[in-house]
Image (spheres, rainbow, N blue to C red):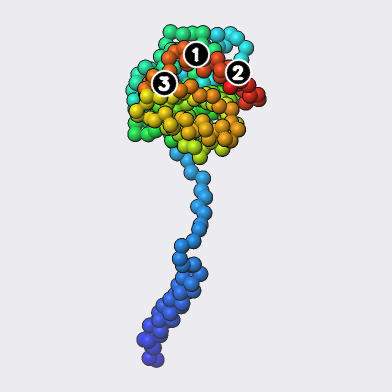
Amino acid sequence: MVKDKSAPVMVTRYMLVAMIALGSCLAQTAETGQRVYTFEKEIQRRVRMQYLLYLPAAYGSLDGPWPLILYLHGGMGRGDDIERVMWYPVPKMLIENDTFPFIVVTPQCPAGEMWTDTEALIALLDEIVSEYSVDPNRVYLMGYSMGAHGAWYLAYKHPDRFAAVAPMSGMTNVWWASRIKDIPVSAFHGAQDTLVPVSETQDMVKALEREGGNVRVRIDPERGHCPPSQKEHEEVFEWFLEQSRTRSTSR
């Protein structure tokens, strides 16, 4: 019996033709040109940041829950040396003050970043709220310079989390106003600021007013790019205590 040596070759050819035909068929199902698609996938990542936590001396002995301030520092405080954060007004005020009526969280922005990682900030806030006696309706947001821009942005991204926000001398985006309008705002800026123009705050205040927002502003005609005085900070703290997510009071 003579074997047909051509048979295996014929099978291979048929398989190749079938594969080509199948590939051609699959290729025809893909739509060419530019089209809109949606990518959705749950991802996880690890974040790390140092932070200062202030608890009043009366914490634990007085009934809670306590109001909380999340304070975002300016650009010079970035890095991994927490001492760089200590010269900013709020943490500096708390060094020898054990009667301040708030819990205060002051995270340190990692080097090369600028408070755009709102997921990390909210995750930190969630952890503090869960571990300490915090009133979720009296969580306040405050920031200076780069931290003020971060405060505007965080309020825009999570308007339901804060009872009031106090940005000081920071960049803004007027397109955020429609989402911030329901949060009481106390803004500050120096008219002589050459680093961040005062128009940044003025334009945002106007945008919030057009939206019917609860906003007050202090423009210091003699101030450059520097934070408000301790007295001016204390006025903001008193105003914070009048604000709650369950009520809206004076401007």
Say which of 196 and 220 sits in front: 220
Measuring 43% from the left and 35% from the top, which residue is drawn there?
A: 116
Residue most extreme to the bottom: 1
Measuring 51% from the left and 24% from the top, which residue is drawn there?
A: 217
The amino acid sitting under disc 1 is Glu
Q: Nearer the viewer, mark 3 or mark 2?
A: 3
Say which of 227 and 135 sits in front: 227
Give neighbour class at mark 2: few <14, some 14-19, many 20+ (Cα, 10 Å). some
The quarter holding residue 169 reads top left
Measuring 57% from the left and 35% from the top, which residue is drawn there?
A: 210
The amino acid sitting under disc 3 is Pro
Quarter of the image for the N terminus: give it.
Answer: bottom left
The answer to whether residue 203 is visible is yes
Say which of 50 and 14 sits in front: 50
Q: Are marks 1 and 3 in contact (CB under 8 Å)?
A: no
Residue marked by disc 3:
221
**49, above or below 237, in the image:** below
Measuring 58% from the left and 8% from the top, which residue is drawn there?
A: 61
- Residue 242 got which mark? 2
Residues under labels 1 and 3: Cα distance?
20 Å
Residue 234, percent across and down? 50, 13
- Residue 180 got which mark? none
Pick whichever of labels 3 and 2 is earlier in the sequence.
3
Residue marked by disc 1:
234
Give neighbour class at mark 3: few <14, some 14-19, many 20+ (Cα, 10 Å). few
**102, above or below 160, in the image:** above
Q: Are marks 3 and 2 in contact (CB under 8 Å)?
A: no
Badge 3 marks a residue whose secondary structure is loop
